[in-house]
Amino acid sequence: MTEPLILANATLVLPGETRVGSITLTEGVITDIADGASVPKGAVDLDGDYLCPGLVELHTDNLERHIQPRPKVDWPHAAAIIAHDAELAGTGITTVFDAMRVGSINATESRYGAYARSLASELLELREQDALKISHFLHLRAEVCSETLVDELNEFGDADRVGLVSLMDHTPGQRQFRDMSKLEAYVKGKHGFDDDGFKAHVAGLKRMRDIYGDLHEVEAVKAARRFGAVLASHDDTTAEQVAVSAGHGIHLAEFPTTVEAARACHDHGIKVMMGAPNLIRGGSHSGNVAAKDLAQLELLDVLSSDYVPAALLLAAAQLGELWGDIARGLATVTSAPADAVNLTDRGCIEIGKRADLIRFRMRAGVPALGAVWSRGNRVA
């Protein structure tokens, strides 16, 4: 974009407030903010629609869904990445931290193979070719209960845009799956295991935890520091687990599973991120704490779309209704996630920030997206 673009007569979602005004975008940056409903010559009239910062997504499994749309189906990766990118743009997400698992398991029936390094290289190559609509960073999900985590982490370096590393411990019977019946239903549905297969799966993961868990947790923390990435915990359940996270220097907690853990996070200055689908559905599919309950207790700071990209804007609007403050609700998907990963150039409508923006209006209580701009360019 070379010519300035004026978006006028909008309900601007600003830090801590909304007000009617217009903004000017020049060379991908916000260069002016003005009050009032006037529409200058050549401006785009938004007819009072909300104009909000582009959404910032920190934890989505959506790319994995595109590269493996069905079990044992490996879709062409370049096509999958481009489709994933377009889908996110179409839901208002303008910055994404693409979650990729690091840490493979070869000794159990599930046999999770390595894929992150090759997929990351393909994504970064498409980015260099300017083939992607939105801004992509890497989120390495470090599976501590695995055989190959250290080797896989060592394949990444400074040029890989690793912005987030999360500590994953999916040992059965704790954290996300304390309820073994929930785990059994999930794993059998995903992998088609019979009873014996499920028992072997559980035994294998517990064996991985005994052999590698503590060592790999330490190595993942070191890797995050080496990358200059933000370190996140995942599925903290108890105050004791949160204390360990705080000791690692963690400032972001993904999906704590109990009120106890969420409250302990805030006591330690750790921001709490919950899943947008949890909020919309009214509860966790794993039987853990409801995001709405944490919001009502003032213990929710950031939302993630998790496994439904379109959930992010809807959940933020619902939070705005719950709190009686639409600007506050939308901050959980804009400025709060940007701040959590130290992205100071986006996440709010201010002069000098990136011109990542979305236009929407509420229809029957649902935000209907009208347009998306990334670096000032219309992408959806």
Image: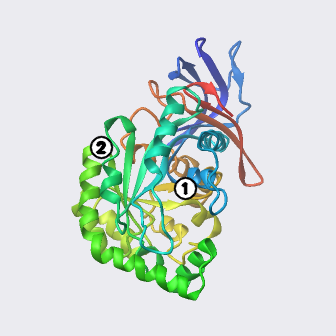
User: In terms of image quadrants, where is residue 318?
Assistant: bottom right
Asked whether residue 242 appears in the rendered view, the answer is yes
Q: Nearer the viewer, residue 344 or 286?
A: 286
Q: Which residue is mark 2?
A: 227
Instruction: Name the residue furthest front.
Output: 107
Q: Position of residue 144 (x, y in %)?
A: 34, 65
Closer to the chain start, of discs 1 and 2, is 1
Q: Quadrant of the C terminus?
A: top right
Residue that lies at the very extreme toward the left in this rendered image: 247
Give the residue drawn at x 30%, y 58%: 269
Seen at 47% across and 44% down, the residue is: 118
Rendered residue at 49%/62% (across/down) = 274
Residue 205, position in %: x, y?
41, 76
Q: Which residue is mark 1?
A: 61
- Element marked by disc 2: helix
Q: Is residue 270 visible?
A: no
| Residue occupying the point 69% across, 18% down | 43
